[in-house]
Image (cartoon, rainbow, N blue to C red):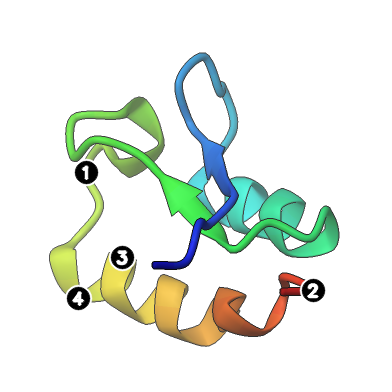
Amino acid sequence: MQALILHSLWGFQGSLQEAIHQARHSGFDGVEANLDHPALAGADHNMVVAEFAAADLSRCGSR
């Protein structure tokens, strides 16, 4: 089993792009959010998938 450190969007007020940027530059393994989070409001499913794929957060962690 592997533990991952996720940047949670609970209480986060910025955009999805800002969250991904913060997670990436802070060494998090990924981003955690529910689909009703304001950062995802009005976002197309394909756009969200593309944003996470482009972020390639799997390479950020030092583990």
What separation in Å lies between label 1 and label 2 (alpha carbons)? Answer: 33 Å
Which mark is nearer the camera, 3 or 2?
Answer: 2
- The amino acid type of the residue labelled 4 equals Asn
**Above or below: residue 41 compared with residue 63:** above
Which numbered disc covers residue 42?
1
Q: Are marks 3 and 2 in contact (CB under 8 Å)?
A: no
Quadrant of image for the C terminus: bottom right
- Element under label 4? helix
Counting from the top left corner in percent of width and height, residue 13 is at 56, 22
Residue 32: percent from the left, percent from the top? 40, 44
Contact between marks 1 and 2 (CB within 8 A): the answer is no
Lateral position of residue 19 relative to residue 8, left or right:
right
**C-alpha distance separating marks 1 and 3:** 10 Å
Mark 2, residue position: 62
Q: Which of marks 1 and 3 is nearer the N terminus?
A: 1
Label for residue 46?
Answer: 4
Marks 4/3 in contact by CB < 8 Å: the verdict is yes
Q: In which quadrant is the N terminus drawn?
A: bottom left
- Residue 26 vs 46, above or below: the answer is above
Amino acid marked by disc 3: Val
**Nearest the eye: 56 or 2:** 2
Judged from the image, the secondary structure of the residue bearing numbered disc 2 is: loop
Other residues around mark 3 within 10 Å, as few (<14) / some (14–19) / many (≥20): some
Q: Looking at the picture, how far across and down is residue 8, in whole percent?
A: 51, 34
- What is the C-alpha distance between the residues marked 1 and 4? 12 Å
- Determine crowd level at label 4: few under 14, some 14-19, many 20+ residues with C-alpha closer than 10 A: few
